[in-house]
């Protein structure tokens, strides 16, 4: 269990799961995992999938509104992760990616 604004946390979680589904495509063996871990004494949620991914050097670019990664053919507006990041910041929480395709977020 985590504590936080249920409506805003739902937006963040659904965004991550939706992105995982979109980027995993129609290939066989799609795996999407949600869980919690303790990092430095803080409860942290994660969403991990087995989509192709991207270079970690582009990690911050994916949180900028209307920015799309090079060679991305996935449909979308480029605002989902930016919105999730803004919601996290508004809640005093964090959203980040350390090793794609695992996204972490706290629930302040």
Image: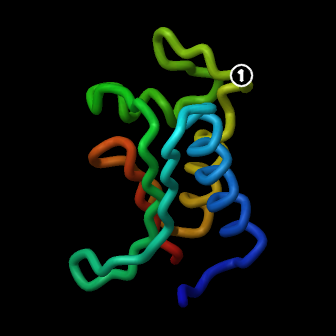
Which residue, given by chain and number where applicable, does mark 1 sit on? 75
Locate the N terminus by quadrant. bottom right
Which of the two residues, 4 or 36, is positioned nearer the viewer here?
36
Report x, y in % for residue 14.
69, 57
Which of the two residues, 25 or 14, is positioned nearer the viewer here?
25
Above-or-below relation of 38 to 86 = below
- Residue in the image at 53% along x and 38% along y: 28
* Residue at the far front in the pictured view: 28
Above-or-below relation of 26 to 38 = above
Above-or-below relation of 69 to 16 = above
Task: Name the image colouring.
Answer: rainbow
Q: Classify mark 1: helix, strand or loop.
A: loop
Query: Pointer 1: residues within 10 angstroms few (<14), some, or many (20+)?
Result: few
Report x, y in % for residue 106.
46, 70
- Residue in the image at 45% along x and 49% along y: 49
Above-or-below relation of 18 to 71 = below
* Residue at the far bottom in the pictured view: 1
Which quadrant of the structure image shows residue 80?
Answer: top right
Relative horizontal placement of residue 56, taking residue 9 as reference (left or right): left
Report x, y in % for residue 96.
40, 51
Report the number of discs. Answer: 1
Relative horizontal placement of residue 52, taking residue 11 as reference (left or right): left
Which quadrant of the structure image shows residue 57?
Answer: top left
- Residue in the image at 57% along x and 21% along y: 67
Report x, y in % for residue 76.
72, 26
* Residue at the far right in the pictured view: 7
- Residue in the image at 26% along x and 85% along y: 41
* Residue at the far left in the pictured view: 40
């Amino acid at each position: 269990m985590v504590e936080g604004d249920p409506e805003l946390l739902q937006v963040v979680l659904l965004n991550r799961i939706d992105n995982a589904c979109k980027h995993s495509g129609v290939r066989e063996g799609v795996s999407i995992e949600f869980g919690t871990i303790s990092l430095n004494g803080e409860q942290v949620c994660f969403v991990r999938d087995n989509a192709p991914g991207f270079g970690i050097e582009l990690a911050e670019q994916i949180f900028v509104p209307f920015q799309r990664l090079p060679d991305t053919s996935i449909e979308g507006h480029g605002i989902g992760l930016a919105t999730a990041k803004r919601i996290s910041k508004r809640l005093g929480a964090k959203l980040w990616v350390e090793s794609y395709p695992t996204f972490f977020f706290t629930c302040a």
